Image (cartoon, grey):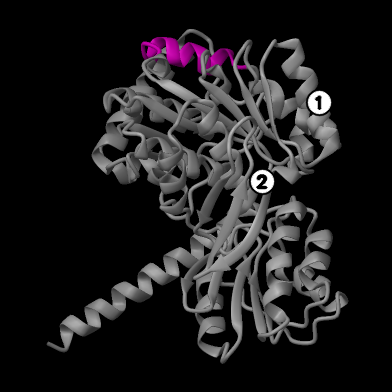
Amino acid sequence: MMIHTDIPVSSYEEAVRYLLEIPYFTKKNDLAAIVRILELLGHPERFFDVIHVAGTNGKGSTCAFLERIFREEGKRTGLFTSPHLVRINERMCVLGTQIPDAAFLESFRRVREAVRIHLKEGGRELTFFETVFAMGMCWFQEEKIDLLICETGLGGRLDATNTIEKALAEVITSISLDHTRYLGDTVEQIAFEKAGIIRRRVPCIYSAKDPGSARVIREVCARMEAEPVPLEPDRYEIRGRQDGALLVRLAPYREEALDLRVPFAAQYQAENACLAALGALRLGARKGAVVSGIAHTTWPGRMEEISRDVFLDGAHNPDGIREIAREIRRIAKTRRVSLVTAIVSDKDYRTMVRELCRDVAYECVTVTEAGGRRKMDPEELAAAFRAAGQKTVRIWPDAQEAYLKAKKERGESVLFCVGSLYLIGEIQHAELRRRTEEVSSEHGCE
């Protein structure tokens, strides 16, 4: 698809439309194009320190924990993550605040000019992710940040973010089968791609939960003379729950145990918080900053209680679904539960449905659509839920209407909205619209 760099772009809205015309996914390219773009931009990525985070599940949450810890340390922090839920601006934050529209437009113009020169030189066009990454680097340079917490896109080795030459540390979260079309069809192959972010003599903090991926990471660390810092499953334990938060004890290497309050209900966030804590401690963060930073972290769309007894979780692959399904089963022991779900077409939806339905009888399953070109046929998804034993399954194609209808009709059920970050984005839109209408209605009555 040709993206024309000579068409005038004069507003934030036009910049967003332009970006959304660029393909999200392509075959994995080498990094020559994005390296050249960064060179034309004056290498903005060299003006701050970086902690680089890869993995299959939990990397966004781990980034959020790390950013908040180092903000507590007094650093001027930047955060680059993907995907976004509602607005592209969410992908770039400084001190917890998203990039303003005016700065977004200015960064877009800078990158677009660099792309124009690059195309004249005979270079290839950038992907959506490469373009947004370059924009982020420009803005972070302008904002004079001290430290960037940077999440990879799909992989690691050939990821645009791997053009960053230096890092204080790498963090690799849990690894499982996802995006096999791009990264390989075994956990070990995917681990090799993720481990491509490991730099020479830079510490690598990683989840050692899966033996196969842990072995690959250790081997790459040895080859790169990088210090391996594994988070073994027996290094932390969930000691209880309090007001929707997990109470977790972490036993770091050569240090006394640390008690953490992880402000999420989902059990899987304990590992993400402990990875971030282990990484921060390795880099010299104060224990007080670690404890406070984790306790004050927010991260939308990950077992987020958006309103009373309504939870959103963007689990987007079988391993992520397995974790949220554990939470659903825990709650279903004492409460009735309902589900709103949408899954994109390139996922292993049959496995995901089986996990969501294991030992759970939902009051109602509402199947909808989300994901644009990648959305899955809701009839096919609904059939899978019926085959998995669910009695009440309905289809409501419009995701926002599906959510609002399920929320209105749930009665005493706990409502889980699960299956795709695209779905979570639609629900966030619906809630924003609903709240805006409520406020307008109240003001109209005065």
Tag 2, which secondary structure? loop
Circle 1 packing at 10 Å, graded few (<14), some (14-19), many (20+), is many
Classify residue 219 as left or right of residue 287: right
| Tag 2–tag 1 contact (CB < 8 Å) | no
* As drawn, 332 above or below 142: below
Q: Quadrant of the C terminus?
A: bottom left
Q: Quadrant of the N terminus?
A: top right
Residue at (55, 27) in percent of width and height: 282
Eye-nearest disc, 2 or 1: 1
Residue at (59, 35) in percent of width and height: 153
* As drawn, 406 above or below 186: below
Residue at (16, 89) in percent of width and height: 445
Classify residue 311 as left or right of residue 189: left
Classify residue 423 as left or right of residue 293: right
Circle 2 packing at 10 Å, graded few (<14), some (14-19), many (20+), is many
Residue at image mark 1: 216
Can residue 418 be seen at all in this image of the molecule? yes
Q: Earlier in the sequence, mark 2 or mark 1?
A: 2
Res. 187 image quadrant: top right
* As drawn, 137 above or below 402: above
Residue at (44, 51) in percent of width and height: 297
Can residue 127 be seen at all in this image of the molecule? no
Name the amino acid type tagged 1.
Val
Name the amino acid type tagged 2.
Asn
Classify residue 193 as left or right of residue 143: right
Residue 175 position, x and y percent, is 74, 40
The answer to whether residue 375 is magenta is no
Which residue range is magenta in the image?
A: 31-43
Residue 350 position, x and y percent, is 83, 62
Label disc, if present, on residue 57 of the rendered structure = 2
Q: Which is nearer the eye, 170 or 395?
A: 170
Label disc, if present, on residue 324 of the rendered structure = none
